[in-house]
Each structure stands twice: as C-alpha cells, then as structure tokens.
Image: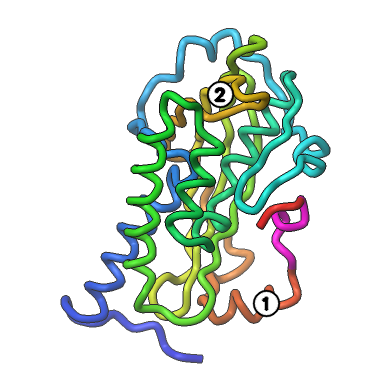
Amino acid sequence: MAQRTTTPSGGRSNNRRAAYVAVAAFLLGLAAGGVHRGRNAQPPPEAAKAHRSGIALDAAATTPRRGAVPGGFARSRDGAVAAAAAFLTTGQSLLDIDPLSAEAAVRQMASTTTADVQIADTLKKLAAARVALSAGTGTIRFSQAVLASRLDDYTQQRARVAIWNVGVLSRVGVAPPQASWATSTFDLVWERGDWRIRSETIAPGPAPMLDASAAPATSEELEAALVDFTDVNEMRGGR
C-alpha cells in the first residue's frame, strides 16, 4: 500500500487543496443551486410548527425517473418529502452527464421562476468540481444518502422539507474518500403537474464524529471494497 505523505507547499499539495475547496462546494448544494446558511443560522419560522416525517422510501423507490430527473410525485405530504429526497440525491447523475443535459435536467426539476438561477449555479459548481477532480484517475464516485426528514410546512401548492443528508466523494489521486454532512431545506411548489424546486437552503451538519471501528479508506481501498455493490439511488430507478 502506498504511504500517505505530506508534500511541501506547491505542486501536488496545492492541487489537492484546490480539490478539497471545490469538493466542499460540490458536496453542499449541487442539485438545486443551494443558498448556504452559516452554522449558527436560525431555522425558518415554520419549523416551530413542523410535522416530523420519516422518508417515504417506498414512494421514492417507485417514483419514475427519466435519466437524471426525478418526477411523478404524489400531490401529498409524503409525495413532497419523497420529491425533496429524490432531488437531493441527483449529484452523481448530474456529474455523469454533459453540461447541456445537466441544464435540461435542472430546468425540469426547477420552478419556472427560479430555473435560470438554479441552472447557472449548478453548472458553475459542476465545472469547478470537474476541474478540481481532473487530475485524478478512474471513477469519480459521489454517493449520497438521506438520513432523516422533517416536513416544516405543507399546502396543496407549496411545501417546505428539511433533509439531513451525507455525501461521500472519492477519486483516486485527488480526492481521498471524504464525507460532507448537511441539512438541506427545500422550498417546493406544485407546478406543471409535479413538485418542483423553488429554492434550496443548506446548513452544514450536524456531523457525527468518526468512531474507531475502522480506519479511513483510501480511494483505491474504497473502489476495491465496493466493486460488486450497486448504488441505492440507482436501484430506485436513478441514473
């Protein structure tokens, strides 16, 4: 196994620092052009009257998807939660397609009034991530998981859903496996016969501490361990 060493400033170490910065932006809010809130930001007023909800996994699993684009959600509380969860986990799909296809995918997910802003932000983040990861080799792996949800507000026309989630990104030579924890709050609108993203607000964390049960894996070790695994989002009809 190759030794993990720290090199002097410049060269490869600078490339890795640049990658970490771009990856952090990529992991937080790629799917919907998210607006970042500070760590100590207050929750929205609607949270005080929140309805707690588990992720509608069955609904999400049976939701039709077209390429990178989730769709076909029920006009209900569970449908809004399933939509937010599905929108959040489109990172790998968006990373895998070309910019024109990514633009079309984001426009399909977005509300009409905010689509242009979401497209511009997402394409900027995708471009930065690709540049930062270009020095690596092999597969770019970006695995996302939804861990908990909270339905903060709901009407037949609008919904606000908070999703606690984790994203793990890895590429050999440039991005050792790294996790980013965040809470994404989606403001959804019922438009064009489905739930669409009006906006996404992202707060870092809460992030757990890594326990001592296993040492952090290298990218090579991660790829070797997961060679026969299928991504959960792909199993649900994703990319």
Three-letter residue code for mark 1 = Ala
The residue that disc 1 covers is 225
Q: Are marks 1 and 2 in contact (CB under 8 Å)?
A: no
The residue that disc 2 covers is 188
Label 1, label 2: how many angstroms apart (C-alpha)?
37 Å
Q: Residue at x 38, y 75 (%)?
A: 174
Residue 232 among magenta residues: yes
Q: Earlier in the sequence, mark 1 or mark 2?
A: 2
Q: Quadrant of the C terminus?
A: bottom right
Q: Position of residue 64 (x, y in %)?
A: 76, 43
Residue 210 among magenta residues: no
Mark on residue 174?
none
The crowding category of the residue bearing disc 2, from other C-alpha atoms within 10 Å (few below 14, some 14 to 19, many at least 20), is many
Indicate whether 166 appears above or below 10.
Answer: above
Q: Residue at x 29, y 80 (%)?
A: 6
Q: Residue at x 76, y 33 (%)?
A: 56
Secondary element type, mark 1: helix
Between residues 117 and 101, which one lies in front from this camera angle? 101
Q: Find residue 71 and report its image quarter.
A: top right
Q: Residue at x 45, y 54 (%)?
A: 100
Q: Position of residue 199 (x, y in %)?
A: 45, 28
Three-letter residue code for mark 2 = Leu
Secondary element type, mark 2: strand
Q: Position of residue 52 (x, y in %)?
A: 68, 20
Front position among marks 1 and 2: 2
Between residues 183 and 131, which one lies in front from this camera angle? 131
Indicate whether 78 appears above or below 55.
Answer: above
Point out the stretch of residues depicted in magenta. 230-236
The crowding category of the residue bearing disc 1, from other C-alpha atoms within 10 Å (few below 14, some 14 to 19, many at least 20), is few
